[in-house]
Image: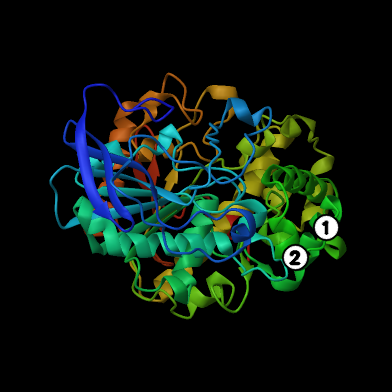
Amino acid sequence: MDAAGTPPTDTRTAVAKVSGGAVRGSRREGVDTLLGIPYAAPAVGADRYRAPRPVEPWEGERDATRHGPTAAQSPYPTPMDRLLPSSVTPGDDYLNVDVWAPAGGSGLPVLVWIHGGAFVRGANSVPTYDGTAFARDGVVVVGVNYRLGVPGFAALHGAPTNLGLRDQVAALEWVRDNVAAFGGDPGRVTIVGESAGAMSVATLMSSPAARGLFHQAVVQSGGAAAVCTLDDARLVAAELATMLGVPPTAEAFGALDPQAVVAAQTALALAIQSAPDPRRWGASVLRGGLGIMSTFPVVDGDVVPDVPLSALAAGAAAGVPLLLGTTREEFRLFLVPTGIAGTVTEAALPVLAARYGWPAGAVETYSANRPDASPGDVAAAILTDAGFRAPTRDLATAQHGAGGAVHQYEFAWQTTVADLGASHALELPFVFDTVGDGGFMVGPDAPQGLADEMHAAWVRFVTDSDPGWPQWNPQDQAVMTFGTPSEVVRAPRADELALWP
């Protein structure tokens, strides 16, 4: 399949009956591909700020040979547009799923993919997320689109909270009701996400609304504390409304051009990053958003009844097997291409530590462990642990304590593209076995053998709950380190991780 979602010419037809009617996709080399299937009615106009509604029926066979529309968003700005692929397609039916399934299968495990993009970008149509390799290996893949940005997560008066999460729940309900039509077993569903998608997965694990709709989880580069309070979310919504010249209500926002809202939310994120004042934006917005996100899940007492980490520690997903991990150098993606890393001096490190509340001794410990690293490299390492590795440890600890089998990994292979190293999102084409597509910064030297290894581990976990290495626990912190070669490491860089409470 090419980047535009056009199926190759040597295909046969694949037809399935789902909620709403029949869909007609393509079949190639034993894999059925059916794209752009609505799981809810179009959320446009006033409905953009209402709960998802049941899908509207159609007559005949709906064409499912091309990816569907995407939620309103902008492409990645320069320089990120050269590193991260965008997939932006206007249209009303953006609450859709893509399905890849082994032809003629039955009772197969199901992987539900929730994409990342800081809750403001992303789509199931990004070529890296092509599910063909999983289907080839006996797994049904369902990629989900959901509301992003302001429609998905702003706290507006008159609108339900967390509409993006409500969309994800509606998609999981669709999977429960329809995945058997593609050979999947609705009793063997694993939800998988990366970055904002991983934060979504952790939040769904804690949500009563999603209980029983999945049975395992994979959290890639995300934790269980990326939420803000309702009061702080309303501060952000009020600022956004002022920028747009309307009151912060669902009615007023529903009447706006969606692209005007996208432009305003982009400007809002820049304002928060340039002047991170907790009195203006709310401390929980700055803390939960990692200094990157401005609209994201809200603790509402409903879909998100509590901070997910607290709910999980109390047993919200007791016994659910969990695979989770990070890349080794997550924050290089945010500091190196933008040139920020190059501006950090040795004298600036203590200033940054004070401004962002880094723990005592962090600058000294990380610097001593990297004697040849630049100050920018040290800052990236500290922020990697603050934003990703420490939250991953906390989630692993909570789920282990609640009786769930936990397996942890770290992705350590370093790309030569743009001096990114083992940066955020780099593991994705290895998981999906799409390194040959050249997406997500892998470059021409990406080792196919590592993709074979990592993809196989995800297939094993989705199929048998065991990716192939020892379980993690607080005493024996076994972490599969994916590299060339890969190896299990106990408690990597423990002295650094111990600095984070």
Left or right for 115, reference 269:
left
Quarter residue 322 falls in: bottom left
User: Cβ–Cβ below 8 Å for labels 2 and 1?
Assistant: yes
Q: Position of residue 467 (x, y in %)?
A: 28, 52
Single out the residue that lies furthest toward the front: 59
Q: Position of residue 491 (x, y in %)?
A: 46, 55
Q: Which residue is mark 1?
A: 246
Q: Please tell me how many numbered marks the rendered image carries.
A: 2
Tell me the residue at 55%/52% (across/down): 196
Q: Amino acid at mark 2?
A: Thr
Foreground of the two, 88 or 479: 88
| Mark 2 neighbour density, 10 Å: few (under 14) some (14–19) many (20 or more) | some
Q: Amino acid at mark 1?
A: Val
Instruction: Give the CA separation, mark 2 to mark 1.
Output: 8 Å
Label 2: state its secondary structure. loop
Q: Position of residue 47 (x, y in %)?
A: 59, 60
What is the quadrant of the N terminus in the image?
top left
Q: Which residue is mark 2?
A: 249
Foreground of the two, 176 or 422: 176
Label 1: state its secondary structure. loop
Q: Is residue 305 above or below residue 247?
A: below
Tell me the residue at 14%/49% (across/down): 105
